[in-house]
Image: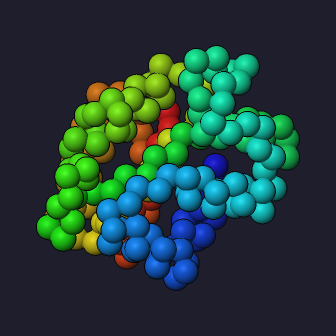
Amino acid sequence: MKNIAGAIAEHFFKKEQAEIINHFADYNIRVEGWFHGELIKLFIDNGYTIESTCKPTLLFKKRRPDFVILDKKDNKYVWEIKAIVIENKANKARNIRKIPRYFKDEEGLAGAFGELKISKYPNEYILVFAYPMQKEDVTNKWAVQVSETQKQYGIKEIKRIHQRNLLISLWGK
């Protein structure tokens, strides 16, 4: 998974992508579908086959993971994608949450973390795109929540990359 995690970071930190994400942040837009579309292209370009998207599968009858992908050896990887807009002093819109609330709210990250905790599937990941993340106090709050979440759910943040206005966080068991 390290190779694909690096490819994801490289793709989303390109200048063109960063500019689009800045617009999302400027206008308080959470556009998870855009991230899905970009990831489909990225997975295919990196040699993965997409088995399913956003629908129940034989593995998950009730849940709808965002992606189930196969590598060249037919190993399955399950991905849940979360795009979150973080409240800061510049964007105090009503529909934007603060970091602690995202980590505790079942409709935010807590629901996905709970599902990952009980999942019996070894290659399951949560990929979080958080923006805007330009302020140091915001990234410090993120780190505090990561520590608490890892203890509470018994899962771990595998990789965290922060550049410009975007934080990418990859979670697994």
Q: Let me know if residue 147 appears in the view.
A: no
> Residue sitting at 59 percent across and 29 percent down?
64
**How many marks can you see?**
0
Image position of 97 with respect to 76: above or below: below
Q: Residue at x 40, y 25 (%)?
A: 114
* Residue placed most toward the observer, 106 or 115: 106
Within the image, what quadrant is residue 92 found in? bottom left
Q: Nearer the viewer, residue 109 or 76?
A: 109
Q: Position of residue 63 (x, y in %)?
A: 56, 24
Which residue lies at the image location 60% right of the left edge and 39% below the top edge?
Answer: 66
Q: Position of residue 3 (x, y in %)?
A: 66, 58
- Percent position (x, y) of residue 98? 21, 50
Question: Where is residue 16, by image quadrant?
Answer: bottom right
Residue 89 or residue 136, whichever sits in front: 89
Report which quarter residue 45 is drawn in. bottom right
Does residue 117 lie above or below 4 as drawn? above
- Rendered residue at 64%/17% (across/down): 61
Looking at the image, what colour scheme do you see? rainbow
Asked if residue 34 is positioned above or below residue 104 in the image, the reply reads below
Quick check: 171 left or right of 85?
right
Residue with the most extreme bottom position: 15
Residue 69 is situated, as x and y percent measured from the top left of the image, at 73, 41
Is 44 displayed left or right of 107 in the figure? right
Asked if residue 55 shows in the view, the reply is yes
